[in-house]
Image: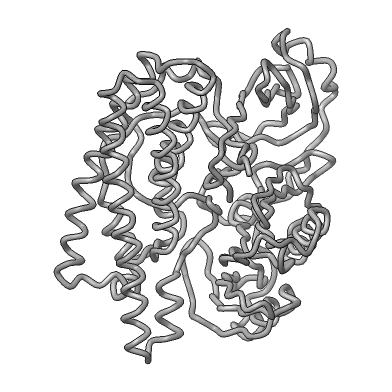
Amino acid sequence: MKEKDVLNVENKKEKRFSKSVVVGLSIAVGVLGLSTIGFGVAYGCMMATSTQYATQLENVYQKNLYDLVESVNNTETKLSKILASNSSTYQKKLLSEIAQNSELAENSIASLPISQNSLADSVKFINQMGGYTQTLADQISQGKSLSKQNLETLSELQQSVNDMKAQINKFVKKVQQNYSILDQSFKIDGDFNNFTIQLSKIKGEGVDYPVMIYDGPFSDSTLDKTVKGLKGDTLTQQECAKEVENCFKNCAEISYAGEINSRFETYTYHVTNSDSQVLFVQVSKIGGHIITVSGQGSVTSEKNITENDAKNIALDFARQNGVENPEIVWTQTVNNHIYLNIAPTENDIVLYPDLVKVKVDMASGTVIGYDATNYFINHIPRALQKTGHSASEFRSLLPKDVAVKHERLVLAPLDYNREVICFEYECEKGGATYYFYLNAENGKEENVLKVIHTDDSSKLM
């Protein structure tokens, strides 16, 4: 099924590519998009008495690390071949394969015990490399050739990935010398475990991309690190476990897996539902709010619920976890999973900074992915007032050759930690979809996003 909804700024910003973004390795929001903080810690706490299980888990971690190495090596080789090739057909093939390699790299990292939100620049690099190369492949499919600027950017990418390749292979040598990923994931230094700290040292010089939003407008909108949205009393792990059971109606078994004291102070649980799906759930000590849920879902393509059913399940789950006035602002269905972005509203204004991501398995009707990090960091009463202008007043400020499909009032998170009330205009131009954000007070153009349609679903959640 064709994947869509990778958003990019207009091509004119491509000229600003420069070597400025720190490059490393980490997971996208991914693919799900979703955080795996304390994955190794949680398993270790639950199974510390089982030497056999610890060995098996270490083997799983090492396999994913080696898979990551293979993806990086293949990417560097393919980038080199593109730069040496004069065949558009061959270049298109390699660009599509690089996008697939990016997905494989994200999947590998997703199963490593990386501390939450620890490598934001690295997340962006992996995502953007896949999105950018797939965009170029699509352009070639439309009869266009790679421009000089495209080739310069690909050359910078190749240099960055080559540096990454050298550094990560050094890291692998440590593993070959009896370095234990599992053991290092138990050792916490501040907010991060030792494995995350050491992996974050694998960096190179990167390229600066235009802004890309992969699963809906402003999907990654954390403005700062101060947690402002948690409410309620401090609960025990038994009380939080009851909150988890109440949220998962098909919960068959729940086990406590330990505490994580990072940006949020949380308890972690393993939840097994009646469909034998295992979920990893992180719950705030304050208020007992679910912060993240991560699970694989069903492997079958069967759908036992409709998309409307899934939307209602996602909204009910968000409400039950303290999200006020939730509204679905973005959806994408891939196979038997539906991905949703949910934002609260205030005075009929969509609050993009407080976005919540949800993934629902349409075979079991279960929430198997959830990330409310942005919400509980950013959400506060804002006392927003509607503008004295209407969307139709500023419509004339849009480009003359666009067709407006939809418009609404939103709070947009912008540069320099600004939150600005804007009119959001969803527009069509030349077969492409654009989102224009005009300041609701003066009509100033604050941002423009473009939807890039790809066959790659790795940019979701």
Q: Position of residue 428 (x, y in %)?
A: 72, 21
Q: Position of residue 350 (x, y in %)?
A: 76, 40
Give whichever of 60, 112 is nearer the camera.
60
Image-based side of 313 in relation to 283, left or right: right
**The N terminus, quarter of image:** top right
Image-based side of 165 in relation to 152, left or right: left
Q: Position of residue 3 (x, y in %)?
A: 61, 41
Identity of the residue drawn at 80% across and 28% down: 406
Q: Is residue 314 above or below residue 253?
A: above
Outermost residue toward the bottom? Answer: 49
Q: Quadrant of residue 430?
A: top right
Q: Quadrant of residue 419?
A: top right
Q: Is residue 316 above or below residue 435?
A: below
Image-based side of 47 in relation to 452, left or right: left
Image-based side of 221 in relation to 289, left or right: left
Outermost residue toward the top? Answer: 400
Identity of the residue drawn at 47% across and 70% down: 261
Identity of the residue drawn at 14% across and 69% down: 177
Q: Position of residue 126 (x, y in %)?
A: 41, 43
Q: Quadrant of residue 101?
A: top left
Give whichever of 218, 168 is nearer the camera.
168
